[in-house]
Image (cartoon, rainbow, N blue to C red):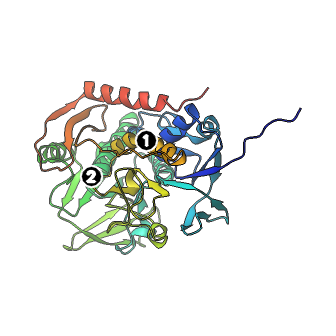
Amino acid sequence: MQQNIQPIVKKVVLIGGGHSHAIVMKMFGIKPLTGVRLILITTASETAYSGMLPGHIAGFYSHNECHIDLRPLVNFAQAQLYIDTVVALDLRNNKVLCANGLVVDFDVLSIDIGSTPATISVSGAAEYAIAAKPVSQLLEHWHKLVETVGKNPQEPIRIAIVGGGAGGVELALSMQSRLHRILDETQQPIQNQEIHLFQRGQELMPNYHQSVRHQFQHILTDRGIKLHLGETVCKIAPKTHNEAKEVFEIKCKSGLTVECNKIFWVTQASAPEWLKNAGLGTDEQGFILVEDTLQSQTHPQVFASGDIATMVNHPRPKAGVFAVRQGKPLFENLQGILLGKSLKPYRPQKQYLSLIGTGDKRAISTMGYAYATRGTFILPPHKLLWYYKDWIDRRFMERFRFE
């Protein structure tokens, strides 16, 4: 008996396995569209959940607990998965070009690839510093460092973190927490470990209210993390006199020089060049300019969400909380454009709750606003706030568990 095979009439291509796209695929699995082929192109089959990443670095979460496995999610959405790196877009002919020669046609395109720290302007940063993204490479270096310290806890270790935004601050506290536990377990003095945090501005966490900045500056100073505020790193160079382990010299414009064994780069986010080269409208940092519908300002067949997108009418900080909230409206508008329906505007919240871990299973709670100059409230570090954050994060991850 011959089966009726529904022809594919539309191709939807998702580039990147970010938070918004994970939600989109889950919702396509729940509410599929007949005749629509869904394709995901991503550099890895797993994606880290940003909310739990600092806890993973601190040793509180396993790899599986804080990573979304995209393979069962793709199967649930009845989609195709290509593990590849996008290098160019042909928007005149609606094609995605990948590093391994793969060319994928699309009718509708959505981009959710996050962002990467900008390192190009600093001599030696690309060669010798470890970028915070892609996360897989960051974790590979971090796990090797943890293993090395575990085997040789008596060896002094100096770590530098360049970038004093929320990401750099959380990274410093999480790394220190993990290393201190190793030293405690092996009965080594915590003085064997130093963490240096460099921030070009005079204050940490510029996207947060002043009360939040002061709270974290007090915590970092109290825990012995060495702050270098108002210091712009201008050069990183290897030191050749010590062959036993890597030693790098960090030079700042002020003349300050600090030697470290590992350097992690968590500076202002940037976007890949292929977005601008494709002709997409972008802001000064290269992020895709999108309307309230999450459509590109210049190409209505292209959508963007998460850190890679800048909402023209509602600019917001590059934070995971917004990427998660964009998932449902992105799904609805992708389905809307496929069905020929009017698209719905999405307006992100002007205020949002931030729960920021302090590396010791405690968290600070603050009400953030679209503009950091507005008033706010802040709750100091507390275990109950960590448990609340942990509950929220685990509940989010449960949405992507498939038996």
Residue closest to the eye, 7 or 261: 7
Q: Residue at x 34, y 69 (%)?
A: 249
Classify mark 2: residues with Cα within 10 Å, few (<14), some (14-19) or many (20+): some
Q: Where is residue 297 shown, x and y percent of the image?
A: 38, 62
- Give percent across and percent down for residue 235: 33, 73
Name the quarter where the C terminus is drawn. top right
Residue highlighted by disc 2: 314
Q: Amino acid at mark 1?
A: Gly
Q: Position of residue 312 (x, y in %)?
A: 30, 58
Label 1 secondary element? helix
Vertical side of 154 occupied by 244: above or below:
below
Left or right: residue 47 compared with residue 200: right
In the structure shown, which secondary structural element does the residue marked by tag 2 occupy? loop
Q: Which amino acid, mark 2?
A: His
Name the residue tied to disc 1: 327
Q: Eyeballing the image, is 285 above or below 221?
A: below
The image quarter containing residue 85 is bottom right
